[in-house]
Each structure stands twice: as structure tokens, then as C-alpha cells.
Amino acid sequence: MKKLFTILAAILISTAAFSQTKTGGVHIYNPEANAMADLKAATEKAAKANKHVLVQVGGNWCTWCIAFHNLVDTTAVLKQTINDNYEFVLVNWDKDHHNDEAMKFLGFLIVLVTLYL
């Protein structure tokens, strides 16, 4: 499960690296959320429900993250597949909120630091 977790997070982070402009008016991510608590809760809930955890790391500035979220939200088959098989967690990552503990938990602290250089 950790391998799947890592692969999905890597894909979402790599797409976020290509989109650095702020998208006005969109508030999918909560910068004040406790990402580590959200990840732990999703992991526990997924284990009980025999599901996987899908983590989307990004921010309200990320057009690719917003596009992915909108695609899933407006495509019934994708939305149903994710709801049936995954606990979905949004982890905010922006210049003011790095969520270092959550990134370390996901194994991506070094990757995120290099993206911002």
C-alpha cells in the first residue's frame, strides 16, 4: 500500500511542478488543514474499509491540480471509482505551508525542496 501511496503522490507532485501560477477564486485546498492528521485518518479509514489512500498534493495556485480535481468531480465513472476504492486526501503545499511532517511521511521532503529551487 505504501508503494501505491508513493507512486500516486509522485505523479501528482510532478504535475504540480509545471504549474506555478495562482488560480484566482478556487479553494479546493485548505492551507490551515492538519495534513498529517488527515493522512492518518484516511489511512485508518482505508484499512477498515479495505481501500487504498489517494493523496493529491498541491495548492490553490496549481492549475493542474485544479484540473485533475475538476476532471474527477465531473466524470461520474472516475468519481465512483475513486469513492469505491480510495480514501481521497488533499494535502496543501504552497510557499507558506509546506506541511513538512506530511511530506516526510509520504517520502517527498527532498523532492519538494528541489521543486522550489
Image (spheres, rainbow, N blue to C red):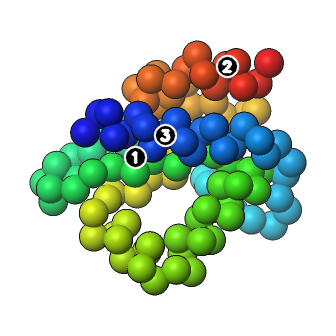
- Asked if one can make out residue 44 in the rendered structure from this viewpoint, the answer is yes
Disc 3 to disc 2: CB gap under 8 Å: no
Q: Amino acid at mark 2?
A: Val
Left or right placement of residue 3 versus residue 47 in this view: right
User: Does dot 3 land on a helix, a strand or a loop?
Assistant: helix
Q: Which residue is label 2 attached to?
A: 113
Q: Residue at x 35, y 71 (%)?
A: 81
Q: Quadrant of the C terminus?
A: top right
Left or right placement of residue 42 versus residue 62 in this view: left
Q: Residue at x 60, y 22 (%)?
A: 111
Left or right placement of residue 62 versus residue 7 in this view: right
Q: Amino acid at mark 3?
A: Ala
Provide residue 80's location: percent of width, then percent of height.
36, 77
Task: Give the Cα distance between marks 1 and 2.
Answer: 22 Å
Task: Give the Cα distance between marks 3 and 2.
Answer: 15 Å
User: Does dot 2 land on a helix, a strand or a loop?
Assistant: helix
Q: Earlier in the sequence, mark 3 or mark 1?
A: 3
Q: Amino acid at mark 1?
A: Asp
Q: Which residue is label 1 attached to?
A: 38
Disc 3 to disc 1: CB gap under 8 Å: no
User: Does dot 1 land on a helix, a strand or a loop?
Assistant: helix
Q: Residue at x 54, y 75 (%)?
A: 73
The relative height of residue 80 versus residue 98 in the rendered view (above or below) is below
Provide residue 107's location: percent of width, then percent of height.
44, 23
